[in-house]
Image (tube, helix red, strand yellow):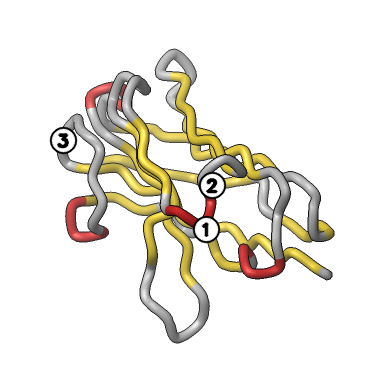
Amino acid sequence: QVQLVESGGGLVQAGGSLTLSCAASGRTFSSVGMGWFRQAPGKERDLVAAINRSGGTTYYRDSVKVRFTISRDNAKNTMYLQMNSLKTEDTDVYYCAAARSSSVYLRSQEYDYWGQGTQVTVSS
C-alpha cells in the first residue's frame, strides 16, 4: 500500500506561483514513477506531469511546459510540482499518483495509488 497526501493548493492570482507537495508513505517511494494529474468537475482526469523513479526523466503536457516543474526528493519521500505563470485555465483539483513501476507513465490506468486531491484556483 502507498498513502499519498497532497498539500500546497490554494487561491492565487493569474501570473502567480504555487508549489504543490505530495508526501508518500508505505511502499518504497523511490522505486516507482510518480505523476501529477488534474481534473475539473465532470471532466476526465488529465496528466499534467510525470517523473520516473530517479527523477532523471520527466514528461509535461504541452500547456504547462516551461511554466511547471516536477521534481522529487526520494530521501524525503516527497514529490513536488512548481507552478509558475499560472493561468485561469490551470484552475482544477490536482492529484498526485504513484505508478506500479519505475518509469514515466502517461495514462491514469498505469497508476495504482492516488491522493485525495488539492484545489488550485487561479483568479483573473
Mark 2 vs 1, N-terminal side: 2
On the picture, is 18 further left or further right than 27?
right
The outermost residue toward the bottom is: 42
The three-letter amino acid code for the residue at tag 1 is: Tyr
Determine which quarter of the picture holds residue 45.
bottom left
Cα–Cα span, label 2 and label 1: 8 Å
State if disc 1 and disc 2 touch (CB < 8 Å): yes
Determine which quarter of the picture holds residue 105.
top left
Near-viewer residue (86 or 65): 65
Mark 1 vs 3, N-terminal side: 1
* Residue that numbered label 1 is attached to: 94
Figure quadrant of the N terminus: top left
- Disc number lying in front (2 or 1): 1
Question: Residue 101 has which mark?
Answer: 3
Cα–Cα span, label 2 and label 3: 21 Å
The three-letter amino acid code for the residue at tag 3 is: Ser
What residue is rendered at 38% in x and 56% in y?
47
What residue is rendered at 74% in x and 64% in y?
122
The outermost residue toward the top is: 75
- Number of numbered labels in the structure image: 3
The three-letter amino acid code for the residue at tag 2 is: Glu
